Amino acid sequence: MDTEELIRKCKAITLKGGEEGKVSFKSTMKSKGEKIVVGCLIGKVLTSRNVNKKGLKIAMQQAWQTIKEVKIDAMGENIFIFRFAAETDKRRASAGGPWNFNGALIIFTEPTGIGEVSKQSFTNASFWVQLKNVPIMCMDMGTISELGVAIGRVEEVWIDVNGECTGEIIRLRISIDITKPLMTLLSLEQEDGEEDAVPITIQYEKLPDFCYCCGCIGHQYRECTKFKNQAKEELLYGPWIKATTMVDKLKQHRGKERWNITTNE
């Protein structure tokens, strides 16, 4: 039985006259609790499968390359509390990502309130997003930010060494609502209506498992209520929505250079 169901049953007893104990959350308790919260993140693994705590801990410490050990405790329904001994480790986990475990997205959040798990929000995750077919007149940080707002909350616009954001690919880090289907297209319309709207494509770096049927993160197409046994190729979404990261592109480029050197010898 999950925690929320257990709470519901316990409350039903008190409503029928059952005894309910009451405790006052004193300032001294709060002071001690705040010290615990400062070093914590709460993470939820978006998968229908049960997550192994030990495997998750090993995978995350390898991904984060932590300075000190990270302690992990299960909180139910694939929700875990991550306790960091080093602030730099926590910052890397919080600001980096998106992180995944066996392909399933992990949403991390700072504990809010007094840390009641059932009241934490796991609806948003940050991704580096790539826009293509951006008009030259839009290659300004302010304008790019306005384009990004249509996708989610803009956290950063990538700029080059000259402080500019120009080129075939425009990158933004955006916090998106993962309860909604992934957006794949922006339509840029001009106020005067003299020209057709400009289609701007959207791709996501380090995109974890998502549904090719409905476009939502958290399940795969065979688990989707909208899946009607269509062929995979007939589904609206596909791997093409995943963008190649800048690091991977650099590796590919270096690989081609080495191949060219070898073939020319």
Image (cartoon, rainbow, N blue to C red):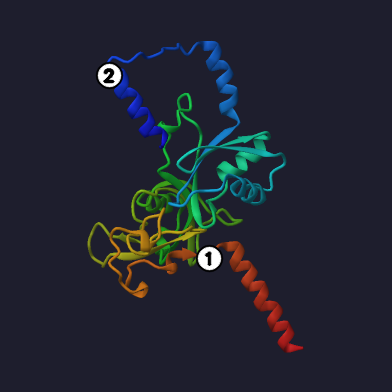
Check contact, mark 2 vs mark 1: CB within 8 A. no
Above or below, 227 against 113 in this view is below
Depth check: give the residue in front, 90 or 102: 102
- Measured from the top left, where is residue 39 in percent x and y? 61, 31
Q: Which residue is mark 2?
A: 15
Residue that extends furthest to the right in the rendered view of this protein: 265
Image quarter (top left, top right, bottom left or bottom right) of the N terminus: top left
Label 2 vs label 1: CA separation? 55 Å
- Measured from the top left, where is residue 204 in percent x and y? 46, 59
Q: Amino acid at mark 1?
A: Thr
Q: Which mark is residue 244?
A: 1
Depth check: give the residue in front, 113 or 6: 6
Residue under the point 71% across and 39% down: 68
Depth check: give the residue in front, 123 or 51: 51
Quick one: label 2 or label 1, which is nearer the N terminus?
Answer: 2
Residue under the point 58% across and 44% down: 53
Number of numbered callouts drawn: 2
- Measured from the top left, where is residue 236 in percent x and y? 32, 67
Above or below, 98 against 20 in this view is below
Q: Amino acid at mark 2?
A: Leu
Q: Secondary structure at mark 2?
A: helix
Above or below, 228 against 120 in this view is below
Q: Residues within 10 Å of mark 2 (few under 14, many from 20)?
A: few
Q: Is residue 261 left or right of residue 197?
A: right
- Measured from the top left, where is residue 153 in percent x and y? 41, 45
Above or below, 217 against 5 in this view is below
Q: Secondary structure at mark 1?
A: loop
Q: What is the quadrant of residue 238 in the picture?
A: bottom left
Image quarter (top left, top right, bottom left or bottom right) of the C terminus: bottom right
Q: What is the quadrant of residue 102 in the picture?
A: bottom right
Residue under the point 41% across and 13% down: 21
Depth check: give the residue in front, 205 or 84: 84
